[in-house]
Every structure is written in C-alpha cells, then in structure tokens.
Image (cartoon, rainbow, N blue to C red):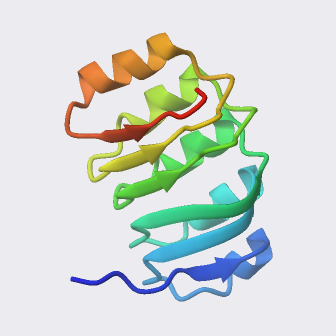
C-alpha cells in the first residue's frame, strides 16, 4: 500500500488543527512542543522532519507514547542522548529509526538497541 504524502506542520499550534486520523507528518522544526502536540494523533505512523531539530530526550519520551509510530526521523537532533533510545525501544510498531548525526547518542546505546530490537532498521550515519 502506498503511503500518503505527509502533512507539513511548522508549529505545535498547527498540529492541533490536524485531523486525529493523520498518519504521516512532515515537521519543519521538531522540538518538544511539537512532539507533545503530536500525541493527539492517535494513528501517527510516520514522522519526518525537514528542517531543524531541537527535540530533547523529554520530547522523544512524549513521542514514545504514540504506539502506532512505524518510522521516526530524529536525525540531526543534537540534544538527544542514549536515554532517547531507551524510550523508542518500547514503540511496538517502530520499524525504521534515523539517528544519523545525533552526536549525543553513543555507539554503545545503538548497539544495545540493535540487540534489543533486531527487527528495527536503524540509520546511523555520523552517529
């Protein structure tokens, strides 16, 4: 089944106006406020960001409460740490995770996540 084009959002306020059944979101700036707002989308499956990422471990923990996420793009998120990977490991539907250029994430944490979730495709360029 072909995925729909993602809905572009720039702010947490814009997320509040999305239909609850939105499944694919492209975020211009990913931060903790947007992550928290995304919790209102009960069917969110794919989260991609196309601009800046200011998300922290707290924002990733908020995203980790959305059990329907299948694809999560956290690349270029300098404020996340190994703790973020502990949170996303619990996402039951997660199949693809991008933590490329997340300099706060250690190779050891990535190795632990791979061992814990062998079903998960993890992109790690520069991490």
- For the C terminus, the quadrant is top right
**Residue 16 x %, y %:** 68, 79
Would residue 17 be visible to someone looking at this image? yes
- Please say if 56 is above or below 29: above
Q: How many marks?
A: 0
**Residue 32 x %, y %:** 73, 50
**Residue 80 x %, y %:** 67, 31
- Please say if 66 is above or below 97: below
**Residue 58 x %, y %:** 66, 37
Seen as rendered, the residue at the extreme top is 108
- Please say if 7 is above or below 125: below
Residue in view at x 54 percent, y 38 percent: 99
Would residue 66 be visible to someone looking at this image? no
Residue in view at x 37 percent, y 34 percent: 89
Seen as rendered, the residue at the extreme front is 125
Residue in view at x 64 percent, y 56 percent: 35
- For the N terminus, the quadrant is bottom left
Q: Nearer the viewer, residue 6 or 32?
A: 6
């Amino acid at each position: 089944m072909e995925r729909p084009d993602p809905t572009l959002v720039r702010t947490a306020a814009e997320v509040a106006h999305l239909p609850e059944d939105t499944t694919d979101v492209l975020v211009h700036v990913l931060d903790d406020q947007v992550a928290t707002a995304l919790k209102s989308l009960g069917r969110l499956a794919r989260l991609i960001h196309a601009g800046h990422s200011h998300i922290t471990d707290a924002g990733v923990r908020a995203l980790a409460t959305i059990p329907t996420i299948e694809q999560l793009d956290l690349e270029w998120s300098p404020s996340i740490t190994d703790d973020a990977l502990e949170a996303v490991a619990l996402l039951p539907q997660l199949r693809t995770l991008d933590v490329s250029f997340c300099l706060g994430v250690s190779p050891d944490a990535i190795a632990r996540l791979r061992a814990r979730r062998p079903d998960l495709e993890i992109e790690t360029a520069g991490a």
